[in-house]
Amino acid sequence: MRDIVYSFQVSLDGYIEDASGSIAFASPDAELHQYFNDYETEFDTHVYGRRLYEMMQYWETADQTETDPIIVGYAKTWQALEKIVFSKTMTAVEGNARLATRPLAEELAALKQAPGKQIALGGATLAAEAVRLDLIDRYHVVIYPVLLGGGKRMFPLFEHPLSLQLVEQQTFASGCIALTYERIRST
């Protein structure tokens, strides 16, 4: 069965956006960007909320306008991924994407049963619902060495603690740290 992985970039004090809604603090250098390129090969499907999908649209044509081989490589990998978008307002999506037609829990359950690689989940609002429903198997976080002091928190409030186990870690010259945690479930 495939894993659902919530991947995000965050400040040391736990914010995915600053108080103005900017994610400029999470600009990877070449080493970290190559890490993201390599990491993307573990997935064949991305599940997005509307806002993150719209932000990621940059990658739909980045290979036509950029010359940096790392950026071009990421764009080509991203374009090949299946993208499923949850939106209450969009009527169409572009490229290798489709709008979700079922509730989140049903859509993710069907994806987990289908053959393929891991499934990436992204978008703060969508991820908040998946966290509350305990649908995430792995959490992958890249922590940037910056304190934002406010903004959008990486996790919503939820009722019960979720136990996790560290399964992978990597430190970068920039001071960023990538951590992967697996959800520990009672049997």
Image (cartoon, grey):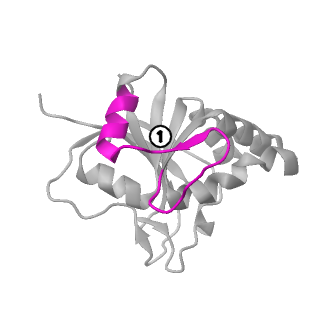
Figure check: 4 above or below 15: above
User: Residue 13 lies in magenta, yes or no?
Assistant: no
Residue 144, visible in the rendered structure:
no
Figure check: 140 above or below 51: above
Q: Amino acid at mark 1?
A: Ala
**Which quarter of the image is occupied by the N terminus?**
top left
Q: Position of residue 95 (x, y in %)?
A: 68, 42
Q: Residue furthest top?
A: 115
Q: Nearer the viewer, residue 62 or 94?
A: 94
Q: Which residue is mark 1?
A: 120
Q: Which residues are magenta?
A: 86-112
Residue drawn where x is 60% and y is 35% of the image: 81
Find numbered disc 1 in the image and state the secondary structure of the residue it sits on: strand
Residue drawn where x is 72% and y is 47% of the image: 60
Residue drawn where x is 66% and y is 33% of the image: 80
The count of marks equals 1
Q: Position of residue 69 (x, y in %)?
A: 82, 40
Q: Residues within 10 Å of mark 1 (few under 14, many from 20)?
A: many
Q: Nearer the viewer, residue 36 or 92?
A: 92
**Which quarter of the image is occupied by the C terminus?**
top left
* Direction from residue 58 to residue 102 in the image, left or right: left
